[in-house]
Image (cartoon, grey):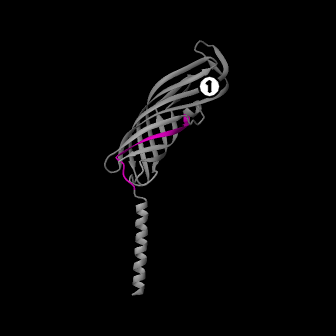
């Protein structure tokens, strides 16, 4: 009898502990949320041949609206700049002229995408997610050689798969953090120097920022 009481008491204690753990992780599922994140870009492939530096000069504003089954729809609108200085190189004009000088290259990007996302446990304090952005970009590619600024303006189509997590600052807090990593593929290209062409620009983006959740 004493053993049964001891076992029952132990089970009750473990059950209470488990329930306490569940409650400590309990939060609320937001109806929607908005994010503002700092964005660091790492160029890849042909884009890396144009500008090899990673750039923290960027930001992304986004919104998500929850549907059934933990699915969410939303948008991302951002701004980014990548740049790099290069040593002496020779550039040839279409008229046969040539100039040897240092050069500075940079690209402005304004991405805009519709996003579909799936959250794992949106009511928890930490909610991992996967998403796919579909949209386009406005890009300006600049090549500065001495006082000359050769540039092209291009629009493109882009795809951005992303993995990340929302972290609430408390069980029922409306503020939290977002951390995410995405891969971006675009149809953009660069045709500015010595007949070298870059096609299908690619990059990795690291996002760290704040989110505001609405019940």
Residue 89 on image: x %, y %: 66, 23
Q: Is residue 95 above or below residue 50?
A: above
Question: Residue at (43%, 77%) from the top-left corner?
Answer: 10
Instruction: Residue under label 1, please give it.
Output: 104
Q: Is residue 190 above or below residue 27?
A: above
Q: Does the magenta segment cover residue 87?
A: no
Q: Is residue 160 above or below residue 12?
A: above
In the rendered image, which quarter contains the N terminus? bottom left
Main secondary structure found in the magenta portion: strand
Residue 160 on image: x %, y %: 45, 39
Label 1: how many Cα within 10 Å (few below 14, some 14–19, many 20+):
some
Q: Does the magenta segment cover residue 39?
A: yes
Q: Quadrant of residue 134?
A: top left
Residue farthest to the left?
68
Q: Quadrant of residue 11?
A: bottom left
Residue farthest to the top?
95
Residue farthest to the bottom?
1
Magenta-tinted stretch: 27-45
Count the marks: 1
Q: Can residue 137 be seen from the camera position used here?
A: yes
Residue 158 on image: x %, y %: 44, 34
Viewer-closest of 109 and 31? 31
Taking 50 as reference, is 11 left or right?
left
Q: Tell me the element at label 1.
A: strand
Question: Residue at (65%, 28%) from the top-left corner?
Answer: 86
Q: Can residue 194 be seen from the camera position used here?
A: no
Viewer-closest of 43 and 1? 1
């Amino acid at each position: 009898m004493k053993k049964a009481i001891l076992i029952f008491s132990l089970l009750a204690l473990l059950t209470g502990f488990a329930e306490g753990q569940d409650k400590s992780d309990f939060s609320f599922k937001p109806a929607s949320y908005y994010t503002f994140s700092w964005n660091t870009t790492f160029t890849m492939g042909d884009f890396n041949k144009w500008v090899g530096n990673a750039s923290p000069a960027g930001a992304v504003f986004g919104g998500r609206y929850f549907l059934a089954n933990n699915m969410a729809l939303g948008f991302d609108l951002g701004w980014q700049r990548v740049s790099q200085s290069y040593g002496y190189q020779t550039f040839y004009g279409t008229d046969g002229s040539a100039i040897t000088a240092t050069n500075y290259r940079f690209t402005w990007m304004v991405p805009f995408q519709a996003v579909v996302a799936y959250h794992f446990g949106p009511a928890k304090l930490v909610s991992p997610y996967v998403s796919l952005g579909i949209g386009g970009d406005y890009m300006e590619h600049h090549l500065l050689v001495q006082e000359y600024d050769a540039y092209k303006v291009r629009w493109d189509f882009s795809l951005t798969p992303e993995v990340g997590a929302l972290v609430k600052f408390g069980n029922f807090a409306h503020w939290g953090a977002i951390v995410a990593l995405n891969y971006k593929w675009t149809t953009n290209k660069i045709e500015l120097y010595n007949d070298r062409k870059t096609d299908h620009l690619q990059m990795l983006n690291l996002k760290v920022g704040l989110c505001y959740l609405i019940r």
